Amino acid sequence: MENTLKLIHVLAAIAWFGAGTVRAVLFARARGSGDRLRLITFLEENEFLGRVYYNITGIITLVAGVWLVLISNWEFSQLWISIGFIGVIVGIVWGVVFYPRFQREALAGLADGEVSDVREPLTRFALYANVELLILVIVVWAMVFKPGA
């Protein structure tokens, strides 16, 4: 059971991180193009992926991680496990609270205006997405090197 949960946990984390990396690249391309319709399409597709993909992979990562700790000799108080939980929870909260708000603001501005009219929500979206990727790298580092184990 432990190996199966570990596999599920790692695959979900890989899927989440990989999609976040692709999202960052596609967003940079869409934003850099200055094409209003391209940005609208990106934001609409990312909103769909947020509901159907990012949040689900984050929740699977979290649930499998909790379950692993419960059936193993690990402790929730271990530093590497705490880093993992904090990172996953931050990613889920950002995916539920912040990304949808930035996307709504940008889409509303793009509906009637130009790309230059939505610089602020696009900048916040990029900042949160890039910081989330950095946090996930730290989480993966903690899972591999297990500080405090």
Image (spheres, rainbow, N blue to C red):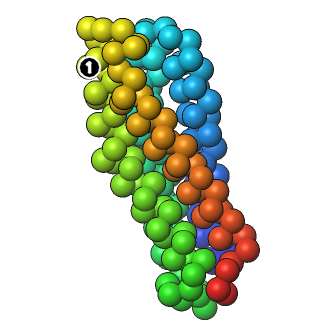
Against 15, is 59 above or below? below
Q: Please, which residue is most extreme toward the right here?
A: 145
Q: Position of residue 45 (x, y in %)?
A: 44, 25
Q: Is residue 4 left or right of residue 107?
A: right
Residue 59 vs residue 96, the one in the foreground: 96
**Residue at the spot 29% in from the left edge and 37% down from the top edge:** 101
Quadrant assignment, res 21: top right
Against 123, is 15 above or below? below
Q: What residue is pinned by disc 1?
A: 108
Q: Position of residue 110 (x, y in %)?
A: 33, 14
Q: Position of residue 147 (x, y in %)?
A: 67, 80
Q: Is residue 21 left or right of residue 108?
A: right
Quadrant assignment, res 104: top left
**SS type, badge 1:** helix
Q: Is residue 44 visible?
A: no
Q: Is residue 116 visible?
A: yes
Against 47, is 69 above or below? below
Q: Position of residue 95 (x, y in %)?
A: 39, 47
Q: Residues within 10 Å of mark 1 (few under 14, many from 20)?
A: few
Residue 51 vs residue 134, the one in the foreground: 134
Amino acid marked by disc 1: Ala
**Residue at the spot 49% in from the left edge and 35% down from the top edge:** 126
